[in-house]
Amino acid sequence: MQKRSDLADVQKGMIIGFRAKDGSISETANFVNCSRAAVVKVYPAWQYGTIQNQLRGTCGAPRAIDDRGERRLRRCFRANRRATVEQLTAQMNQGATKSVSSTTVQRTLLRMDLRPTCELFFLRKIGNQQDNARCHTARSVYAWFEEHQDEFTVLPWPANSPDLNPIENLWDHLDRVVRAMDGSTV
């Protein structure tokens, strides 16, 4: 026989009401259109106050990291926001009775909406390209880049280079055309 879906709260109420009016188990099952086993299970659960409202919440294997484990993982993450999944897994398994895999930790982080925001680009040297704007060509900016030359690579930007930033040349050309026009208006 095929498994049926969970009973809705309305169906559970119909079972309880029909059985309270001294309906038999078979009559109740036919009236509600459910199995006799469901009627046998729902009515006594209501009588003893143990009726379940969960909709198949207990299906499948239990989670390896429960709510308490998620709070611990969040604390480990907040202590070192640049920690890798392997480092967080090692911290979670340290002193734990049940070890978890790095895949489990990664899935839990994604479920907690702690998503990776960037690659580890801090491990490679960052390149910066100037656009010859006055604020970028000041002596203080050049001095700062000289002090931090081990962190940045400054790429040269030739003046009026059409292959690097064509919009700058377009603005320059437009500026020349507008200035050359007669200043009188209509």
Image: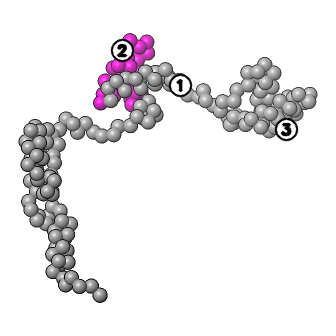
Where disc 2 sits, the SS reads loop
125 displayed left or right of 69: left
Rendered location of residue 151, percent (x, y): 14, 38
Q: Which stretch appears magenta?
A: 82-106
Rendered location of residue 168, percent (x, y): 18, 65
Instruction: From the viewer's side, name the closer residue of 15 and 87.
Output: 87
Kind of residue at disc 3:
Phe
Label 1–label 2 contact, CB within 8 A: no
- Kindly identify the residue that appears in the image at 41 percent across and 14 percent down: 96
Q: Residues within 10 Å of mark 1 (few under 14, many from 20)?
A: few
Residue under pointer 1: 61
51 displayed left or right of 184: right
Task: Say if the magenta span includes residue 97.
Answer: yes
Rendered location of residue 99, percent (x, y): 40, 17
Q: CA distance from mark 1 to mark 2?
A: 23 Å
Relative height, residue 100 to residue 123 (above, below): above
- How many labels sit on residues? 3
- Kindly identify the residue that appears in the image at 11 percent across and 42 percent down: 144
Instruction: From the viewer's side, name the closer residue of 139 and 185.
Output: 185
Residue under pointer 2: 94
Residue under pointer 3: 31
Give the foreground label among 2 and 3.
2
Kind of residue at disc 2:
Gln
- Where residue 86 sits, quadrant-wise, is top left
